[in-house]
Image (cartoon, rainbow, N blue to C red):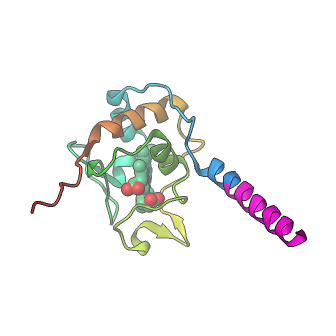
Amino acid sequence: MARWLLLAAAVLFLVLAMAGCASRQSSSGFRLPDGDPDAGQQAFVTLQCNTCHRVSGTNLPETTAVTAVRLGGEVLAQPTDGKLTSDIINPSVQFALGYPDEQIMVGGHSRMPDYTQKMSVRQMADLVAFLHTRYTVKPVPYPVR
Ligand code: HEC
């Protein structure tokens, strides 16, 4: 009997611990103010994001970085506001896929600068609105028999 109780307590502890982690990572309930994509494109250049990024379907001034990380284009699912916001102000939490580590990281951290003191919430909302317009959702086609 005592063993069962111990096991139940352990499971309960694990579930609560996992729920704690999930709430820190989850963007449930997160909502940016509506943004203006044109102002976002302007902020993208003002904040010099274009020095490292190429954005699908735009003709922004050239990137100067060795590796231009591509933003926008065809994706399987539209990125959420939460994902884009974390990518911008907490870039080392999740790294862009498809690039060799040494091109996008230094000492385990993203090469992206810390923007937490350099942009307003308005700029963030506009940037995210701008980036949203640059992604095209292309579902995987069903296999043809
Ligand atoms: C000095 C170069 C540099 C600058 C400037 C820069 N970034 Fe980045 N950015 C990177 C690199 C390298 C990555 C890939 C590593 C990572 O995911 O953090 C990245 C990743 C991203 C991603 C995630 C891409 C993905 O596929 O997951 C977004 C979104 C992004 N940047 C937006 C911005 C915005 C918006 C700005 C300007 C406010 C900006 N970046 C400025 C270098 C830069």
Res 98 → quadrant: bottom left
Q: Which one is nearer the viewer's eye here, 36 or 51?
A: 36
- Residue farthest to the left, as pictured: 145
Res 141 → quadrant: bottom left
Query: Residue at left 50%, top 28%?
Result: 122
- Residue farthest to the front, as pictured: 1
The correct choice, above or below, for 99 with respect to 134 in the image is below
* In the image: residue 130, left or right of residue 92: left
Q: Per the image, is 27 magenta? A: no
Q: Which one is nearer the viewer's eye here, 119 or 133?
A: 133
Residue 121, percent from left and from top: 54, 32
Residue 131, percent from left and from top: 35, 40
Q: Which one is nearer the viewer's eye here, 37 or 115?
A: 37
Q: Per the image, is 4 magenta? A: yes
Residue 114, percent from left and from top: 55, 51
Res 44 → quadrant: top left
Image quadrant of ligand 1 equals: bottom left
* In the image: residue 132, left or right of residue 62: right
**Quadrant for the C terminus in the image:** bottom left
The correct choice, above or below, for 9 with respect to 46 in the image is below
**Quadrant for the N terminus in the image:** bottom right
Magenta part of the chain: 1-18
* Dominant secondary structure of the residues highlighted in magenta in the image: helix
Residue 66, percent from left and from top: 33, 66
The correct choice, above or below, for 11 with respect to 122 in the image is below
Query: Residue at left 67%, top 58%?
Result: 18
* In the image: residue 129, left or right of residue 30: left
Query: Residue at left 34%, top 35%?
Result: 130
